[in-house]
């Protein structure tokens, strides 16, 4: 019986390297691929510290592929990355929302583009080093189950994958703790065994999003007013791209008590400030819904909702379901529901689906 062929997206990090190693041990015909997504070499300066988009990522991935004796290629996805990740990132911030570019990159670059090319060259699957477990339910649908390493679980950032994409995907490291992955890399004598994990958005290595957006667009953001919840002008902000819901530090304005960003109003170029209690809400609305474990969501359905990547999750009830949108109610108020971020719904361990937060 002919072995199945899998294309492994290799970032030059330890997780994707071990993914390729495990798949080869399991008998797959493995092809290593690094997705060339950087626009200019100087933009990505963090790859030595574990990033996934710079030139040394290619060097590290190529060395690992040579060690594993697997074919290795670099595929150019610059146009796809610019359109679906960078342009989206800029557009969302300028609209007063806080995007998650990794979710967009996963759906439209790492899966949609890479999978299409991989299937075209005769591969059966693609694989990555993400910490998630693929699970097929009795209803025939594919879903993602939380990783064994809860601390590293990445299912939140993968909620938007389609059933077709999941049916051609493998997650070799999802059943391991991070420490075990590094141990496996050591045993295989992989040079990246102790390479640090990446932390930042790869194309904004200094985390200065506002600067990046101004350089990308060639337009300097216009200052506007900080206002209170009741409309009083409190001071002037540097431009809405500098702020996100729940933010306290870096406001450049002093009061006798801590103040927080409660709302961003792009139409009037205002940033609303309030107390910490004003940042809590009991409901949210999301659109651009992607169903995973279920074919559709139902009104009254109880779920666990994660409203950001590092959120532990909170119990919620689906209070309404509309055309490509849903409303959630939280029995206990949650902090800093942020338009532009994803809300991902779980049934304890499995991803039910999710959407993009549009309001609270």
Image (tube, rainbow, N blue to C red):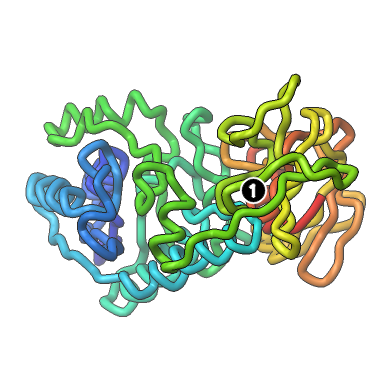
Query: Is disc 1 placed on a helix, strand or loop?
Result: strand
The residue that appears at 17% across and 54% down in the rendered structure is: 55
Residue lying farthest top?
Answer: 256
The residue that appears at 28% across and 55% down in the rendered structure is: 43
* Image position, residue 292 (x, y; %): 65, 58
Relative to residue 104, is residue 38 drawn left or right? left
Q: Nearer the viewer, residue 303 or 206?
A: 206
The answer to whether residue 127 is seen in the rendering is yes
Q: Nearer the viewer, residue 327 or 68?
A: 327
| Residue bearing mark 1 | 351
* Image position, residue 28 (x, y; %): 26, 56
Q: Nearer the viewer, residue 231 or 161?
A: 231
Number of callouts in the render? 1
Residue lying farthest bottom?
Answer: 120
How packed mark 1 is, by other alpha carbons closer than 10 Å (few <14, some 14-19, many 20 or more), is many
* Image position, residue 136 (x, y; %): 58, 54
The residue that appears at 77% across and 28% down in the rendered structure is: 276
Considering only vertical position in the picture, is 45 above or below 175?
A: below
Residue 51: quarter of image: top left
Considering only vertical position in the picture, is 222 above or below 59?
A: below
* Image position, residue 100 (x, y; %): 54, 52
Residue 253: quarter of image: top right
The answer to whether residue 354 is seen in the rendering is no
């Amino acid at each position: 019986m002919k072995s199945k062929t899998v294309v492994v997206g290799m970032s030059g990090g330890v997780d994707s390297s071990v993914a390729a190693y495990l798949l080869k041990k399991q008998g797959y015909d493995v092809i290593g691929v690094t997705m060339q997504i950087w626009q200019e070499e100087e933009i990505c300066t963090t790859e030595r510290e574990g990033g996934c988009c710079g030139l040394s990522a290619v060097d590290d991935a190529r060395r690992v592929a040579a060690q594993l004796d697997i074919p290795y290629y670099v595929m150019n996805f610059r146009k796809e990355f610019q359109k679906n990740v960078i342009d989206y990132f800029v557009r969302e911030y300028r609209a007063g929302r806080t995007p998650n570019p990794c979710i967009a990159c996963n759906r439209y670059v790492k899966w949609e583009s890479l999978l299409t090319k991989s299937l075209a060259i005769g591969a059966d699957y693609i694989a990555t080093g993400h910490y998630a477990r693929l699970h097929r339910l009795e209803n025939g649908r594919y879903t993602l189950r939380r990783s064994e390493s809860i601390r590293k679980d990445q299912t939140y950032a993968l909620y938007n994958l389609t059933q077709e994409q999941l049916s051609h995907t493998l997650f070799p490291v999802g059943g391991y703790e991070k420490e075990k992955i590094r141990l496996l890399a050591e045993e295989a004598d992989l040079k990246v065994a102790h390479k640090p994990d990446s932390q930042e958005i790869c194309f904004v290595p200094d985390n200065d999003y506002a600067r990046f957006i101004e350089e990308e667009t060639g337009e300097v953001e216009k200052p506007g007013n900080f206002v209170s919840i009741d409309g009083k002008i409190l001071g002037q902000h540097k431009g809405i791209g500098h702020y996100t819901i729940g933010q306290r530090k870096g406001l450049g304005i002093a009061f006798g008590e801590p103040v927080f960003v409660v709302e961003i109003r792009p139409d009037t170029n205002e940033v609303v400030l309030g107390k910490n209690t004003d940042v809590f809400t009991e409901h949210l609305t999301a659109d651009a819904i992607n169903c995973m474990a279920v074919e559709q969501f139902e009104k009254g359905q109880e779920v666990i909702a994660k409203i950001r990547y590092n959120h532990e999750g909170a119990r919620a009830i689906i209070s309404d379901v509309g055309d490509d949108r849903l409303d959630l109610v939280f029995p206990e108020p949650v902090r800093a529901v942020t338009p532009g971020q994803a809300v991902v719904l779980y049934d304890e361990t499995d991803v039910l689906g999710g959407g993009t937060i549009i309001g609270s």
